[in-house]
Amino acid sequence: MTGRIDRRFAELKREGRAALVTFTMAGDPDPQTAIAILKALPKAGADVIELGMPFTDPMADGPAIQAAGLRALNAGQTLKKTLDAVRAFRKVDAETPLVLMGYYNPIYIYGVPRFLKNAKAAGVDGLIVVDLPPEEDEELCLPALKAGVNFVRLATPTTDDKRLPAVLANTSGFVYYVSITGITGAAAPDAGKVKAAVARIKRHTKLPVAVGFGVRSAAQARAIAEGAEGVVVGSALVGAVKDSLDKKGKATGKTVKAVAKLVAELAGGVRSAKRPS
């Protein structure tokens, strides 16, 4: 299956640069502002978009993304509204790949066949579901691939060579390498270690490898982009949303601009990276 994700990574490979993959939370700080942020991302320099599906028990997320999910849920965000946001985005952007990221429970409650049908129709390209291991591929991964939706898997520093083939077996689109053991946004990744880890993953797959967890600045983004095909930034962008809110936690005139400004800086870092030819 060749979709938007494959096309985008192939295009960037020809250009000789890595992708900036941005994560924001659907519905944060409110549904309307979140859609405005979503629409601003590609213009600011995002190559691939990850959109968080808020969930009440996000065990792999650090405080920043947990708080974003809570703000979204408090503002009335649902999985249906998240798919509506994707539809609104697709009215202005038919090319940028969009991946939904989150946990299995909301999808399970929505109903897998219905969810996949509606997600595909809305313009979703892929899924990252952090609490479904390869042993449970029958649940969602295989039905997603059958529906023409990429299933992106996470690899971590503890995923050894024995485990990697199972992790990569039904993965498509790209591999998301979690550069730090622990929760999101916890610490800064070590570029040297990341480069070695990406090289190890590449011995097992031809898929692009995008690296995330802990990237906050243009300099960090540049360092990671020198050794990987994608750089994922989430907690820093979610933090930019939070810092722009008023005392009551509501969006201000600065909210969309703050996120777009940070994305532009990160994109500058990614684009200035010296990539192996």
Image: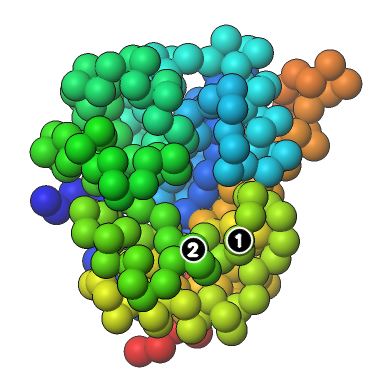
Which label is found at residue 148? none
Q: Is residue 42 left or right of residue 257?
A: left
Q: Nearer the viewer, residue 28 or 174?
A: 174
Q: Quadrant of the C terminus?
A: bottom left
The residue located at (27%, 75%) in the rendering is: 204
Q: Nearer the viewer, residue 142 or 96?
A: 142
Q: What x and y, as percent, mark residue 19? A: 43, 63
Marks 1 and 2: CB-CB under 8 Å?
Answer: yes
Which label is found at residue 181? 1
What amino acid is labelled 2 in the image?
Answer: Thr
Residue 41 in sight from this viewpoint:
yes
The residue located at (40%, 51%) in the rendering is: 48
Q: Is residue 209 left or right of residue 248?
A: left
What amino acid is labelled 1 in the image?
Answer: Thr
The residue located at (50%, 81%) in the rendering is: 195
Q: Rounded to the nearest whole Å, what is the CA distance between mark 1 and mark 2?
A: 7 Å
Q: What x and y, as percent, mark residue 196? A: 48, 83
> Going by the picture, which residue comes out furthest to the top?
76
Secondary structure under badge 2? loop
Which label is found at residue 156? 2
